[in-house]
Amino acid sequence: MIGVIADDVTGATDVAAALSRAGLQTLLAFDAATHVAGDADAIVIGLKTRSIPVADAVATSLVALRTLQNAGVTRFYFKYCSTFDSTDAGNIGPVTEALALALDVSTVVTTPAAPIHGRTVNDGDLYVFDVPLHETHMAHHPITPMCDSNLVRLLTPQCNGTVTTVPLAAVREGVAAVRATIAAADGAGVTQVIADAMTNDDLAVIAEAAEAAVLTAGSAGLIGAIAERQVASGRAIATAPAGRTAIIAGSCSRRTLEQIADFQASGGTSHRVIAEAGQTAEQLAEAALTWWDEQSADSSALIYSSSSAEERNDELPEAGELYEQVAGIVAHGLAERGVQRMLVAGGETSGAVIRELGTMVAVVGTEAAVGAPWIHDVDHGVHLVLKSGNFGDVDMFTSLAGVEDND
């Protein structure tokens, strides 16, 4: 059985989608210590460890590792963001090293390449739709600004061990060449090997070369290639039922803003959450839910706090955390009202929704968009899409909510 430890919630759904896409019945858990039991081919544990203190990220990840071991997992994967979100302190390097030490693994093959999402690696440099990482919007990320595209330079300060690469030439030469490169690195005491990959075929070669590895790491790209080499159980992948959809958006990414604009331009009804000084999350959520109650009983609708950089109020420095709390309270209120379908945009927003709903384990279903599957919280009777801010086509909100049926 494959077990994945993901460093955030939407990253967990992304990798769960890759496993499900390969035909593997996948369970998704949202707490490191949650007991996970069920008939599955893969288990993913979504954490919130991407930007917390290193010691906490390591400790939580090791708890998740023990949870997966107790569930019968024999092959492990550490999933991090395909844009390598991290700082000089971590957390990608330290968590990978800690997992490797616990599993008695000397060298870990890793790559953030995910061609399906436009992420490629060549000469150890990470590209986002052919643009070097440091030239993208990630250079201005408020928590993990990515000001370099070279993965060796990014990862080395985070690690106690040494880092090298599997060059694209070796990948294109084939499985034997990749295995020889990894073996040479292992013999030289290298602890992490970053693999170049420009295409899904490149990832397939790396996956075959590393098929005996107990631990690998990277984005959803490599684990998707690994999953393709597994024998699927043949169980049917569930589909969410049709019906009214609540969209809760907190991401301020360009794609989410485009999706909001498309939804509104198509006639979708929406309520924007705008905080003023002194307002509480409870007050803002109550106003949003009151608005929801005034809408047609069968119409989908959008509640959002997303905004462009120009629209943000610098006088409310804690607004981001406040809006996350609002999203969670709103989701809980919607579930109490019988809403069974929710689309949530944004990693932090998704984490807040999951915590407030009390979702512990969900069954992964079909994809609403690439990397954004429906998941079924069986205990609470809710079907969710937890979408990374940059995922999905521009018309994702509109099409998923069936806005054309509301006119």
Image (cartoon, rainbow, N blue to C red):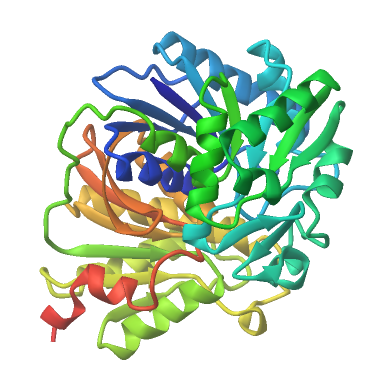
Q: Is residue 289 left or right of residue 108?
A: left
Image location of residue 317, percent across then percent down = 71, 65
Image location of residue 203, percent across then percent down = 53, 45
Q: Is residue 292 left or right of residue 178?
A: left
The relative height of residue 37 versus residue 153 in the rendered view (above or below) is above
Image location of residue 214, percent across then percent down = 56, 18
Image location of residue 43, percent across then percent down = 39, 27
Along the line of sight, which residue is nearer the eye, 220 or 281? 220
Along the line of sight, which residue is nearer the eye, 352 or 105? 105
Kindly identify the residue that appears in the image at 78 percent across and 25 percent down: 184
Along the line of sight, which residue is nearer the eye, 240 or 195? 195
Residue 52 visible to the viewer: no
Could you tell me which quadrant the N terminus lies in?
top left
Could you tell me which quadrant the C terminus lies in?
bottom left
Kindly identify the residue that appears in the image at 21 percent across and 68 percent down: 293
The relative height of residue 330 versus residue 393 in the rendered view (above or below) is above
Residue 327 occupies quadrant: bottom left
Residue 153 visible to the viewer: yes
Kindly identify the residue that appears in the image at 59 percent across and 80 percent down: 308
Along the line of sight, which residue is nearer the eye, 192 or 212? 212
Residue 60 occupies quadrant: top right
- Number of on-image labels: 0
Kindly identify the residue that appears in the image at 44 percent across and 33 percent down: 30
